[in-house]
Amino acid sequence: MALDRKIAYIDLSTGEIEIKPIPLDVRKKFLGGRGLDAYLLYNNKEQGCDPLARGNTLMISGGILTATCASATARTHVMAKSPLTGLLGSANMGGFFAPEMAWAGFHHLVIKGKAEKPVYLWIHNGEIEIRDAANLWGKTTTETQWAIREELGDDEIKSAVIGPAGENLVRFANVMTGIKNSAGRTGMGCVMGSKNLKAVAARGTMDIKIAHPVDALEYNKRFINQITSAKVNQTQGTLGTPFIWGATNSWGGIRTRNFQYNQCENADDIEPERIDEICEETMGPYHMTGCFGCQVHCRAQYKIPSGPYAGKYDEGPEYTSQGAFGGEPDCKNAVTVLTGNHLVDQYGMDNLETGSLISWAMELYELGIITSKDTDGLDLKFGNDEALLEMITRICYRDGWLADTLADGGIPASEKIGKDSFSYLIQVKGMSNLHSDERATPALALNIATGSRGSDHLRSRPAIDLYHLPEEVLRKIYSNPVPYDGPLSSEHTSYDGKPWMVFWQENCYMGVDCLCICKYHTTFLGATLPNFEDWTKVIYYNTGLDMTPKEIWDVAERCYNIERLFNLREGLQREDLKKGDTLNHRYYDEPCRRGAIDVIGATIDRKKFKKMIDEYYGHHGWDENGVPTPETLKRLGLDQEPSHLL
Amino acid sequence: MEKVLMINYQKCTGCRLCELVCSVMHDGVSNPARSRIKVMKWEAEGLYIPMSCQQCEDAPCMNVCPVKAISRDEDLGFVMVDYVICIGCRSCVAVCPFGAMNYNSIDKKVFKCDLCGGDPQCVRFCEVNAIEYVDADRLSTFKKKDAAERLSVAQKEAGALQAAI
């Protein structure tokens, strides 16, 4: 049974390992994955402890559906206090790691303390061993994975690893598995590095009993049909996430030259069709690959066609890399984007954070806030592809003053650089924004301002707000499984009803992250995709757990509130520009300079935005400071936290 | 009509859903170690090749079995193991040139593809059609068509090249 997968507490300081079952009442309250991780983090980490200290607790987990007969149960969740933001650290990756860990008997790892020297964990059919990683230290992400397979003599081992960036405590280092699957935000790789934990390797051949196998198979087939019949997923399956680049850019939604423009001119070279063309010679016909059990297969495969890394195999680049290494630094060459993407994959570093911080530094360089003395002679101007690629490597190895400064993350860097540098830093809660420009879309701006892990598009983005769906369609989606009869607007420039959409999406994505399935399989980019009601069936057929859509909604709300409690405990304050639910002033003060008629001239209206946040807090049952009221906590059964149920 | 699995590895995305549904269909559990089909992977090159039983005519597993536990299903033509007779010596595993006869250390049994009784789940679930269930005597026709298409493309390219010169 999926429900009999265990939780393991691993103390790297003492070498003690304790394995426990996960009680059913805990499952019903938090399901698994991100939700249960949030509960464990809140219960296990001392308040205010330094993210890199022994007291920080790192969770690696699968969800309640991991490796069952449901579609794309591939996601691995990683959580700890973030060394980038000082608040909630939470990241999620695809690939094959969590299913392998589940077949090896485990759903959750709770890793405490710090090993004296580099180690890795070896998880195999119910057993966990701490092994020496001296030979692995210094290796890139893929080198590490292949070396573990060789050492243990099994090609089917799946590992979650860090690269040199995690070892060097770059504060936005990834945990990675496979070629490019990255738990890439909030610096979870840095936490692993701080614990001297190079990798977690898993291999399992233990049965996961399916509660109702015939129904599970049949329902999975239906579920897959629903997912693959959505046009958006069919397009993802041929072009990957870069398919949204062209339309978003011509509309005026691509942040360029840090925050100077909202459209990247002459950027056709980094369109996926063009990348396909130039990779034809090295890779053969354009080919896609997928995560465990997924029929969307959104990851492109490529070999770099030319330049110093010619012939290297990698996967992607995602839409994020197009922005981080193409749009934001204004380097619109396909080979640059492919190479940048390859470097961060090998180093194990967040592509988004890396590209955004370099672009920020480019703007500071242009303004004279930093000079060539600070860059060790590197001409860090916009559009300098070589400087961009050089900076990626320098940041990973903290080579030189500027790279070392940027490796500590945006806010500490701005404090070190001084002058007016902070006001140019496009971040929320210390984490850089995606290159999408949210000035014309108040709902999306609200989503990044309030996301529990800092600026983020996968926490609560109501992406379907951009589709101008008829109000009745929106109402059908957004008034389930709890009724909603407030305003809803089909207009993406409107402020009406958007707080509810953001609140609803938060719960939807929290549900997804508790099940550890992919967001392309729910109401994210497609309006017809499954959510709460469909999940009740998948959960029941696979695990036997009988829940109503409302009960799953309640789990999601409960878990989101725990994340909020954690953030408040670690110092979140509503109006704090560094740790609050706030936007950079440029969102309010600098109108969009390019794009379509509904975009050009757009800014976020301060007053209306404040009202939106009030309304959003109201939906949550939080007071005007964003603190859950005692009634809310009681309603969600959180009035006794930390309750140490596990 | 005898039908067989036709695998086109160039279409495979490496997701391993076939392994999952195979084990759920046969054993009611999720466990790739119980799957009759297996995707062999070279991840560093992005190459994935699903491997399954070829249902050989002159099947080595059938020939080697000392107790004649392996026979051919008369309706669907697949090679099958009779567990009442099987002594678990694993000679069939050793002799199979494709590695398609498996041994499962949980139940201590050899096991292999039985085409799910005529509705192979791996085929049903593979949306990219990397595995198809086709008439055995038409297998080569599909291959011919693929090869012909490649020739035709090559010819067009050569023509275009010549015109350019």
Image: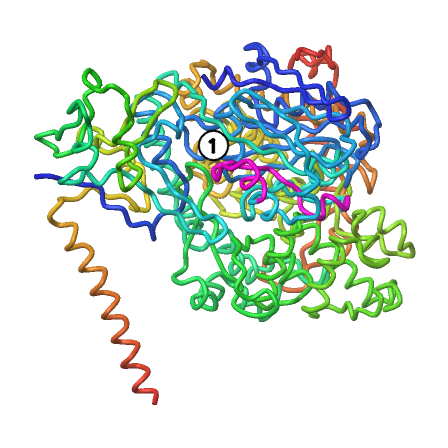
**Which residue extends farthest front?**
B66
Residue A612 shows in the view: no
- The answer to which of A593 and A497 lies nearer the viewer is A593
Magenta extent? A147-169
Residue B91: x and y in percent read 26, 29
Quadrant where the C terminus of chain A sits is: top right
The magenta stretch spans residue A329: no
Q: Is residue A374 left or right of residue A427?
A: right
Q: Is residue A373 left or right of residue B49?
A: right
Mark 1 belongs to which amino acid? Thr
Which image quadrant is residue A173 in? top right
Residue carrying label 1: A73
Which image quadrant is residue A214 in? top left
Here the colouring is: rainbow
- The answer to which of A401 and A382 lies nearer the viewer is A401
- The answer to which of B82 and B51 lies nearer the viewer is B82
Q: Is residue B108 left or right of residue B69?
A: right
Question: Where A627 sits versus B1, above or below?
Answer: above
Tag 1: Cα neighbours inside 10 Å, few (<14), some, or many (≥20)? many
Which image quadrant is residue A293 in? top left
Helix or strand or loop: what does disc 1 sit on? loop
The residue located at (20%, 56%) in the rendering is B143
The residue located at (83%, 38%) in the rendering is A576
